[in-house]
Image (cartoon, coloured by chain):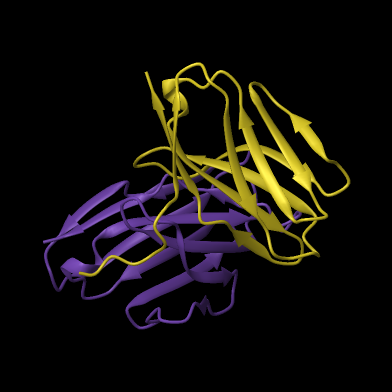
Amino acid sequence: GAVVSQHPSRVICKSGTSVKIECRSLDFQATTMFWYRQFPKKSLMLMATSNEGSKATYEQGVEKDKFLINHASLTLSTLTVTSAHPEDSSFYICSASSGSHNEQFFGPGTRLTVL
Amino acid sequence: GESVGLHLPTLSVQEGDNSIINCAYSNSASDYFIWYKQESGKGPQFIIDIRSNMDKRQGQRVTVLLNKTVKHLSLQIAATQPGDSAVYFCAETGNQFYFGTGTSLTVIP
């Protein structure tokens, strides 16, 4: 099956710093990548959808200047949490779709802790 | 910070029993359905899928049932094991991808 990786798997940072999370599709070209956020024992929350080479589409309530998304190639999307604060601490999950029936393949997630 | 997101419904079953997890979908145009399993601290993993021209599909210990009349999807897990404890999400897709809320399954040894 299709494999999606995320890096880093865990990151701890100081308040006010920026953190970049990478999402890569390893064995297929992802025309669309999605970024989700998940709090403990809660559902996945879609943050934004990005298509290669174009600006990301953000869900209502998600600050685009806070969560910068770049989908520079068909195998890589990045999420940068700018000026991170403790309330940004969460589990961030990306997924990728090749467009074939829109099935999404999920990454393993990145645990962000902001001190 | 304030936690957001929907609380997950929970289901507890005894080890060895069968589990049934239900999902209602909303889009009549959806023609492909997927069940994902998410273990604690990991991303969702594909379990089984079904297309809209089928009512039932079986995998290893899992069966997915699709009722298009009432837009209902279910996942049945036979002889549930402790390793099945996880959150299970359904997803529907056609021209859009929609993720269900998820159900937290706990298997009691």
Q: Among the chains, which one is yellow? A: B
Q: Is residue A81 above or below residue A36?
A: below
Residue A55 placement, left or right of A11: right
Q: Is residue B64 above or below residue B15?
A: below
Residue shown at 73% from the left, 65% from the top: B27
The quadrant of the rendering that contains the C terminus of chain A is bottom left
Q: Nearer the viewer, residue B15 or B102?
A: B15
Q: Colour of chain A?
A: purple
The quadrant of the rendering that contains the N terminus of chain A is top right
Residue A19: x %, y % from top left: 26, 64
Residue A11 placement, left or right of B29: left
Q: Nearer the viewer, residue B77 or A1?
A: B77
Question: Can residue A27 be seen from the camera position used here?
Answer: no
Residue shown at 50% from the left, 16% from the top: B16
Residue shown at 66% from the left, 21% from the top: B60
Residue B2: x %, y % from top left: 24, 69
Q: Is residue A94 above or below residue A108?
A: below
Residue A59: x %, y % from top left: 49, 77
Residue A42: x %, y % from top left: 38, 55
Question: Can residue B38 be seen from the camera position used here?
Answer: yes
Residue B15 placement, left or right of B93: left
Q: Is residue A80 above or below residue B88?
A: below
Residue shown at 25% from the left, 67% from the top: A88
